[in-house]
Image (tube, coloured by chain):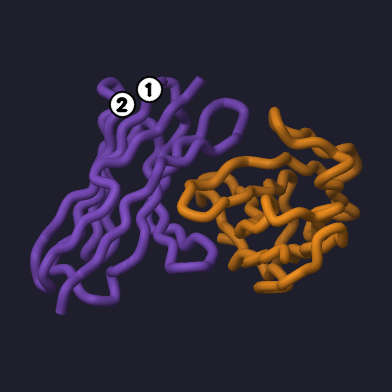
Amino acid sequence: SAVISQKPSRDICQRGTSLTIQCQVDSQVTMMFWYRQQPGQSLTLIATANQGSEATYESGFVIDKFPISRPNLTFSTLTVSNMSPEDSSIYLCSSRQGFHGYTFGSGTRLTVV
Amino acid sequence: KQEVTQIPAALSVPEGENLVLNCSFTDSAIYNLQWFRQDPGKGLTSLLLIQSSQREQTSGRLNASLDKSSGRSTLYIAASQPGDSATYLCAVMEGNEKLTFGTGTRLTIIP
């Protein structure tokens, strides 16, 4: 199955600033997924990113707040914009390869102060 | 809308015991179910993937079963070790390729 490198692993950011999270997959994948995990909660899907098209956002998430890029079949970024303390979470990227199921990056632990 | 529930929310057992984690889902029209473990503050590590046509999968000390018609899956861990301490998440995939995650079971193995 695919291996996903995600960075940064953690960051502490000032409110009002933006952070871009990167995910690199070691093989080509059609779809990549971005999740948020708030403290003590399970994972919630933010958006699905296909190469060459705009990302599809889930209810409650908007492109202005979480812009996503997918320039090729092995790379994607998620930006958390105009951050507030409520954005403090773990952010994870994921991809699926056929019958191997889903693989996740190591996560980005974001703290907004 | 699919809902996935895991019981218990937390579990502590002495080292060496066998244990079972439970996962239930409300809509049986799934393509597959996947079990993950998550260490504190980290990403997810895939443990087992069960296709909708399968009844169980095994990997080492882990065995996962799936009863699609009743909307249930179990993860059986044999001869538990302190290194098994983590949060265990189940997730179901539906036709839109999206995963819906359970609420997780936080497992502590007591040495």
Q: Are marks 1 and 2 in contact (CB under 8 Å)?
A: yes
> Residue A22's quadrant in the figure?
bottom right
Identify the residue at image location x=67%, y=64%.
Answer: A110
Residue A53 in picture, x, y percent from top left: 89, 38
Q: Which mark is residue A33?
A: none
B82 horizontally vs B19: left or right: right
Mark on residue B26?
Answer: 1
The chain that appears purple in the image is B
Q: How many angstroms separate mark 1 from mark 2 (CA)?
A: 6 Å
What subunit carries mark 2?
Answer: B
Q: Which chain is orange?
A: A
Percent position of residue A42, x then y: 48, 47
Residue occupied by mark 2: B71
Q: Give whichever of A11, B23 is nearer the camera.
A: A11
Q: Is the residue B82 above or below the residue B102 in the image?
A: below
Front residue of this view, candidates B98 and A100: B98
Q: Residue furthest bottom?
A: B111
